[in-house]
Image (tube, helix red, strand yellow):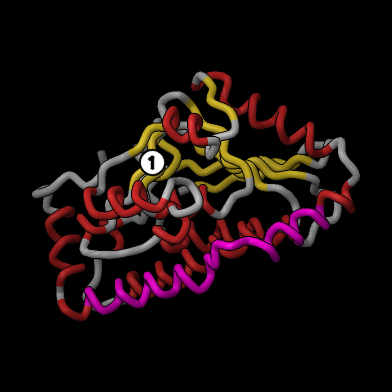
Amino acid sequence: MSVELEIGTDGIAVVTMSNPPVNAITVGDTWSLRDIFADLSTNPEIRAVVLTAEGKGFNAGIDIKEMQSTEGFEFLLGSGAACFAAFDQIYRTPVPVIAAVNGFAMGLGVGIVGSCDIVIASTKARFALPEVDNGALGCASHLAKLVPPMKLRQMVFTCEPISAQQLHEWGTVYKLTEPEDLLETALETARQIARKQQRVVRAAKVALNEIDIYELEKNYRLEQGHTYELNLHGDGPQARDAFVKGDRIVTR
């Protein structure tokens, strides 16, 4: 995957993920995403960040083929560490981060979106956690910010997706746009924020994180612990092998 960064003269940064055909993310790419947001966090000129993707989907989750490319749990553990670090860095970025979701956001993609502050989505976008189909758990902590409690349980157990339209009706998605208008709509929102007093906006971001009822750091670690147990039992490797062999379609 290529993760690109562009910073405008207005203090708005655009981070773009691109790994055709479905934007599945490798361990190395996940660390790169973390590093980019770490650098942005130390830049006093940044006023807002737009996080988006090229192609037909925002993010299809972790690269399962990479995870199954070697024996043992090297890529599994590496992915867990990288995802935790990337989500946490995005969440703690000291300016608002706007997720501009152009298509499917699956698994890890939901974690990325749930780590952001504002969600703007294309009418083509949909969100899902196929983790149970993958013999794993993860990012329910972040999905809990996007959907009501009982919907969360239904989505985790069935792995069925939800549309951006439904999330817009609930207020989770701030603006719903046609695909060709997505980036400009996100940039308009970023510009609106960038015109405000920078110190006040940064203070608001810190305060919102401090009063956040969703304990993402702790809860996501708990999910990871169950995932590691499932791998020791063999459920995780079995499900991932089936995916790699094409016996099962995980993304919907």
Secondary structure, magenta segment, majority class: helix
Q: Quadrant of residue 40?
A: bottom right
Q: Is residue 100 visible?
A: no
* Image x and y of residue 215, in percent: 54, 67
Residue 183 is left or right of residue 228, and the answer is right
* Image x and y of residue 81, in percent: 46, 72
Question: Is 214 colored magenta in this rendering?
Answer: yes
At 58% across and 64% down in the image, what residue appears?
88
Which stretch is magenta? 202-231
Residue 195 vertical position relative to residue 206 in the rendered view, above or below: above
Q: Is residue 150 visible?
A: yes
Amino acid type, residue under disc 1 in the picture: Phe
* Image x and y of residue 89, in percent: 62, 63
At 76% across and 60% down in the image, what residue appears?
207
Residue 223 vertical position relative to residue 163 in the rendered view, above or below: below
At 33% across and 51% down in the image, what residue appears?
129
Q: In the picture, which quadrant includes the C terminus?
A: top left
Residue 245 is left or right of residue 231, and the answer is left
Residue 225 vertical position relative to residue 135 in the rendered view, above or below: below
Question: Is 204 colored magenta in this rendering?
Answer: yes
Give the mark count: 1
Secondary structure of the residue carrying numbered label 1: strand
At 16% across and 70% down in the image, what residue appears?
235
Q: Nearer the viewer, residue 199 or 27?
A: 199
Q: Which residue is mark 1?
A: 127
Q: Residue placed farthest to the left in the image?
A: 247
